[in-house]
Image (cartoon, rainbow, N blue to C red):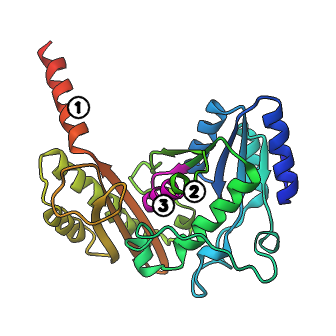
Amino acid sequence: MIVIRSQAEMRQWSREQRARGKTVGLVPTMGALHAGHASLIEASVSRDDTTVVSIFVNPAQFAPHEDYDSYPRTFQSDCETVESLGGAAVYAPTAKAMYGRDYATYIEVERLQEGLCGGTRPHFFRGVATVVTKLFNSVLPDRAYFGQKDGQQVAVIRRMVRDLDFGIEIVALPTVREKDGLALSSRNEYLSPSERARALCISRALFAARDMLEAGERDAGRIVSEVKNVMKDVEIDYAAIVDADELTPVERIEGRVMLAVAAQIGNTRLIDNIQFDPQEARASTQERARSSGA
């Protein structure tokens, strides 16, 4: 495995892989790798001839009061993880190289970036879309892998890729959770033991909502009310049910939706979500009925 620092070297390396007829997979990360990242790397290694893992804590997606300076940085162990999982390269540019003097160009995805996390972090998705664009332009991947825990981010990137004709396949993989249900996040290490115990109400709320959906509840307001009730011991930023593609609020669940939540526990902000499609649920129920009847 090699570590690449410059954009020019990264492009040259990827072009050499392509010239050999190889496909290139990209797993964009900010480091502090955990099992969720590992699932993305493993997926790329299984599908692509070569896998690049980018490690870059992106200043453009942090507001001045947020945790850019304290964000966990574990570069050496991250590189060891990538190598052990079969990654071919780590791309780790510096902030100075990515955002040089007088930098002035940013990408925005209208509408999709405005609600949910965009409501309290209006800077965030401009920074995400911009850095992902820059990573795509340097790594030149055939596929890029993201975790569904960041559901709004996945929707924003999918739309950006479609609208700007990147020709890159976006692969979203299921959220990886601890045994007790807590979604894996690099920020989980900020939590004290008591805060971590309180944070479990987030996944409990989502699982309760999923049970309601699978039981046939289709009133979004009732489901969100139950979610907020289960999460009453944490500071809720938002809890909303939105169209899974457009991210617009829905009152009644008729197509594929995402139930997304964000909460503050102490000084740590955590997000999580589940997706639900009533048509898929009906098909699954019918299949189970056929199987049991057989």
Residue tagged by mark 1?
A: 284
Q: Position of residue 49 (x, y in %)?
A: 72, 31
Q: Does residue 260 sit above or below 269 in this rendering? A: above
First-in-chain label (1 vs 3): 3
First-in-chain label (1 vs 2): 2
Question: Which image quarter: residue 208?
Answer: bottom left
Question: Is 121 left, or right, of 22 in this rendering?
Answer: left
Q: Position of residue 25 (x, y in %)?
A: 67, 41
Question: Is 242 left, or right, of 35 in this rendering?
Answer: left
Q: Position of residue 111 (x, y in %)?
A: 40, 70
Residue pictured at 41% horizontal, 74% vertical: 114
Q: Amino acid at mark 3?
A: Val
Give me the C-alpha separation between circle 1 and circle 3. Answer: 29 Å
In the picture, the quarter occupied by the C terminus is top left
Q: Which residues are magenta?
A: 146-160
Give me the C-alpha separation between circle 1 and circle 2. Answer: 36 Å
Q: Position of residue 284 (x, y in %)?
A: 23, 31
Considering the numbered disc 2 on the image, is that residue within a helix, a strand or a loop? Answer: loop
Question: Which image quarter: residue 120?
Answer: bottom left
First-in-chain label (2 vs 3): 3
